Amino acid sequence: MAATATERKLLIDGEWVETGDWVEVRSPHSGELVARIAKAGAADARHAVDAAERALQEPLPAHKRAEILVRVAGHLARRHEEIAQTICAEAGKPLKAARVEASRAISTFTFAAVQARTLTGEMVPMDASQVGTGKLAFTLRRPVGIVGAISPFNFPLNLVAHKIAPALAAGCPVVLKPASQTPLSALLLAELETEAGLPPGWLNVLVGQASEVGDVLVEDERVKLLTFTGSSEVGWKLRKRAPRKRVNLELGNSTPVIVEADADLEDAAGRLAANAFSFAGQSCISVQRIYVQRGAYDDLLARFLTKVRALNVGDPADEETDIGPLIDRESRDRVLEWIDEARAGGAEVLVGGELEGELLQPTVIANASPDLKVNCQEVFGPVCTVNAYDSLDEAIELANGTPYGLQAGVFTSTLKTALAAATKLDFGGVTINEAPTFRADQMPYGGVKESGNTREGPAWAVREMTEERLVVLEL
Ligand code: NAP
C-alpha cells in the first residue's frame, strides 16, 4: 500500500464499522492503491435498513434538517481542496474539474436546505365543484420512507449529494451504495453529515458488491424508493425487479449538438472542445455528436480542431491537465475498439484515435454513419463525431435518432431556429448557445426514453421523495 493510502470504515447506524473484508480503491492513473474500504455484505445492508427504519420513527423537524444541510455546505467549503484531491485520486478526474465538482456539491446542499424550509403541500379549491362546497382541503407532503441510493463513479461527490441532500430535506433516511471504484468521496460526505449533527441511522453508507448490497435495496420492502444514477442497462433492470417501489432513474445519453451557420462559431467551437473531452468524456452529457450546417462546416471544424489540439492530456493531479485517464483499462480498450470500428466503417479520424502513453488522446471522427457505435451508443470516452447537414429538420432527425434523451444543444443566433429546435428535440433538456454538458444544480435534470424517468435538482427530487397526503375538513 502506498504510504499515503488510507483505510476507511462503513457508516451504519451512526457507527464507523469494519467487516473484516476489504474493497481496494486504486488510482485510475497510476494503479497505486489509494485506499482500502471495509466491504459490506447483505447482512450489513439489512442492518443499515434496520437503522434507517429506526431513524424514520423519530422524524427530524424541517428546521433541524435545514440546519444540518447548511452546516454540511459550510464543511464542504472549508474542506474544498481536500475533497477535490479525493475526487482526483479515486476517479482520476483532473483537479480543475474535481474542484468544480466540489463547489457544485456546496450548491446542491444549499438548495436542498432551501427545500427543507419551504416544502409544502397545496390548497385544493373545494368549492370549485358542487360536491366540495362546505369543505376545506389541502395536501401535506410526507416523506416517502427509506431511500435506497445507488451512485456512479463519474461524479462521486456531487451525484451522491444529489441523492442524500434532497432525501434529508424531504425527511427520508438513506442507505447509500456508492460505486465500488469511487467510494471515498461518499464516505467523506458521510463524515461531514455526521459532524453536522445528523443523528444515527439517517445516512448509512455501504461499499460492496452490487449483487449483495444492491439486492437488499431492491428486495427489502422497507426501502420505498430507489434512486439510481448509472448506466441504462443496469437502471432499467433494477426498475423491472422492483415493481412495487418508486425507482427513479438517471441514465446515459449520446449527446447531440446542432451548430447552425448563423451561430457564433468561435464561441461554439470553444464550448464544444471543452465539453466533449472534460473528464475524458466520462459525463452522461459529454458532447458526443456534433452536426454542423454544411455552409459553416469547414470553418467550425478548423476552429474546433485547433482548440482540441490545445487540450493537455496527462496526470489528473497536474494543475494543467484537461484530459486524464478513463476509469479503467477495460473502458479504455472498449473505446479504442469503437474508434477502430468507425475507421473500418469508412469514418475519418481527424485528431487523436491513439494512445499517448497510457492515455487516450481526444479524438474527433468525421463522417461516421449513424449506425456506428461512436454515434448510436454512449461512448463515455474522449471521442466525438462531426457531420454536416443541409436543413434544420435533417439535423433534428439525426439528433433524435438515438434511444437516449437526456440533454441536447443548439447553437444559433436566430430565435425562431432556437425555439424550433427546443420544441422538436426529444430530450429532457435543451441548451441554446451553451454546450448540453451544462448543468447548474438547481435545474430540473433528467431524461426521457432510455435516459431515465425522473428529474433531479433538489426542488424536483424532494417532490419525488415525498408523498402527498390529502386532508379534507368539513366546515
Ligand atoms: P453502472 O455500471 O451502471 O454503475 C452505477 C452504480 O450501479 C454503481 O454503484 C454500481 O455498483 C451499481 N450497480 C451495478 N450493477 C448493479 C446491480 N445489478 N444492482 C445494483 N447496483 C448495481 O454505471 P457507471 O459505469 O458507474 O456510470 C456510468 C453511467 O452512468 C453512464 O452510462 C452515464 O451516462 C451514467 N450517468 C448518468 C447520469 C445522469 O444523471 N443521468 C449521471 C452520471 C452518470 P459497482 O460500482 O459496485 O459495480
Image: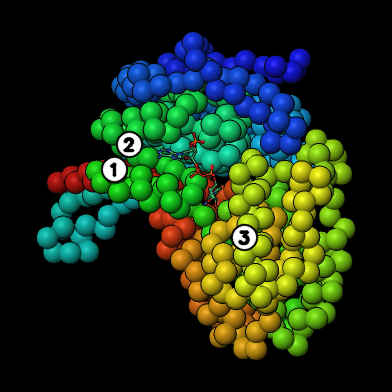
Q: Position of residue 319 (x, y in %)?
A: 85, 40
Is the residue marked 2 within 8 Å of ligand 1, measured from its CB? Answer: yes
The residue at the far front in this view is 344
Q: Position of residue 301 (x, y in %)?
A: 79, 74
Which quadrant is home to the N terminus? top right
Between the residue at mark 2 and the residue at mark 1, the CA separation in whole angstroms equals 6 Å
Can you identify the residue that label 2 sits on? 218
Can you identify the residue that label 1 sits on? 242
Amino acid carrying label 1: it is Ala
Amino acid carrying label 3: it is Trp
Which residue is found at the position 55% from the left and 23% from the top? 23
Q: Residues within 10 Å of mark 1 (few under 14, many from 20)?
A: some
Say the numbered circle drawn on residue 338: 3
Between the residue at mark 3 and the residue at mark 1, the CA separation in whole angstroms equals 33 Å
State the SS at label 2. Answer: helix
Which residue is found at the position 58% from the left and 53% from the top? 284
Q: Nearer the viewer, mark 3 or mark 1?
A: 3
Between the residue at mark 3 and the residue at mark 2, the CA separation in whole angstroms equals 33 Å
- Mark 3 or mark 2: name the one nearer the start of the chain: 2
115 above or below 126? above
